[in-house]
């Protein structure tokens, strides 16, 4: 297959490019690099089966030749990024999705949207199944990301229903691993970076809010299975093993040998209190569930970040 990946220089997008190439496909990665990093794909440059195009997908996307699939992963994805880039986040969710869907329609290609667990907002149902419609504050600071993805899902389903585009939607829960930016504001790089510098880990609120963490290789496996499936409705991908942020901080300190402990700061507005995927649909439809344990995944992530952290 000839596959286009928007956001292909990003954290998940670059791992996806690696996997698709390993599976024998040719890949075109498109990224405007506002949050992506060319270092993530430098090892792929010069390959006959890989092409990188620097481009903002909120503008018309021109690709010469056939395409079999368009995977739309372009978007700021961390709170620091989308709070700093709120309009760009809304535009890539709305205009970028529209342009990517238009390309898929024109090429007769399958389209896969990278959505997010944030469409569930601060959930009133736990764990979160795909049938849950969410509890989102559309005018809060996080709304720029939440509503961009909710709109993107609606646009994707409209193209499926009106134009007959073959569409897939993955709702991605907290994913971590190598190639995350140390400064991207998400809890895994935040905690590991602080721990490796010998600093106390910053816990917001009392740390009782929960998250579940999926290693990137597991996530990519699920995305590939979804792409090749016949499932049109959204599918959750994530690790259902849930823990509190305070428990997670203590685990990171223990694994890195950091003795500085934790420091507590006020909880950000609209921060979800709980987050855990119901993956029964992924198990049933895709035969998928995460395989990499949290300890194993964190060991790999810590090793990656260790060479990128300057001691305090």
Image (spheres, rainbow, N blue to C red):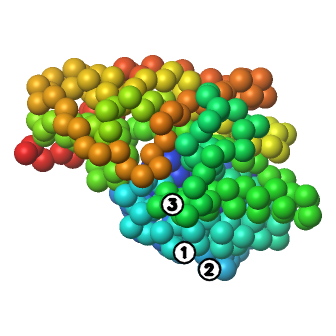
Closer to viewer: mark 3 or mark 1: 3
Q: Position of residue 160 (x, y in %)?
A: 86, 57
Looking at the rendered structure, the secondary structure element under dot 2 is loop
List x then y, in percent, for residue 80.
37, 58
* Residue in view at x 57 percent, y 68 percent: 90
- In the picture provided, is 15 more to the left or to the right than 163? left
Outermost residue to the bottom: 60
Q: Which residue is mark 2?
A: 59
Q: Is residue 37 above or below residue 122?
A: below
Q: Residue at x 48, y 24 (%)?
A: 242
Structural crowding at the residue carrying mark 2, measured as other residues with C-alpha within 10 Å and reported as few (<14), some (14–19) or many (≥20): some
Q: CA distance from mark 3 to mark 1?
A: 26 Å
Q: Is residue 252 visible?
A: yes
- Pointer 2 or 3: first along the chain: 2
Q: Quadrant of the rendered structure where residue 294 is?
A: top left
Q: Position of residue 296 (x, y in %)?
A: 38, 21
Residue at 76%, 63% in the rendered image: 155
Disc on res. 140: 3
Depth-wise, is mark 2 or mark 3 nearer the camera? 3
Q: Residue at x 11, y 35 (%)?
A: 198
Circles 1 and 2 in contact, beta carbons < 8 Å: yes
Residue occupied by mark 1: 56
Q: Name above or below for residue 88 compared with residue 270.
A: below
Give the Cα separation between the discs numbered 2 and 3: 27 Å
């Amino acid at each position: 297959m000839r596959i286009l990946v928007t956001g292909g220089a990003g954290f998940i997008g670059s791992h996806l490019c690696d996997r698709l190439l390993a599976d024998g496909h040719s890949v075109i990665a498109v990224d405007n690099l506002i949050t992506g990093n060319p270092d993530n794909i430098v090892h792929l440059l010069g390959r006959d089966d890989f092409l990188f195009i620097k481009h903002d997908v909120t503008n018309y996307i021109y690709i010469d030749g056939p395409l079999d699939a368009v995977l739309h992963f372009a978007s700021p994805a961390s709170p620091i990024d989308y709070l700093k880039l709120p309009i760009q986040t809304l535009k890539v969710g709305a205009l970028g999705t529209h342009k990517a869907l238009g390309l898929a329609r024109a090429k007769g290609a399958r389209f896969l949207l990278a959505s997010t667990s944030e469409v569930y907002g601060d959930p009133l149902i736990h764990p979160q199944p795909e049938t849950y419609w969410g509890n989102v504050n559309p005018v809060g600071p996080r709304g720029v990301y939440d509503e961009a993805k909710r709109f993107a899902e609606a646009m994707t389903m409209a193209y499926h229903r009106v134009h007959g585009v073959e569409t897939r939607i993955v709702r991605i829960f907290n994913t971590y691993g190598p190639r995350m930016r140390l400064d991207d504001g998400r809890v895994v790089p935040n905690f590991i970076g602080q721990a490796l510098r010998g600093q106390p880990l910053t816990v917001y609120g009392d740390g009782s809010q929960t998250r579940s963490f999926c290693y990137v290789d597991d996530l990519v496996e699920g995305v590939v299975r979804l792409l090749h499936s016949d499932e049109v409705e959204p599918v959750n991908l994530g690790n259902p093993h849930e823990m509190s942020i305070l428990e997670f901080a203590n685990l990171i300190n223990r694994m890195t040998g950091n003795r500085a402990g934790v420091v507590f700061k006020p909880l950000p507005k609209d921060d979800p209190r709980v987050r855990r995927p119901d993956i029964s649909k992924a198990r049933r439809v895709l035969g998928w569930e995460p395989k990499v344990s949290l300890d194993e995944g964190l060991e790999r992530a810590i090793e990656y970040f260790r060479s990128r952290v300057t001691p305090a």
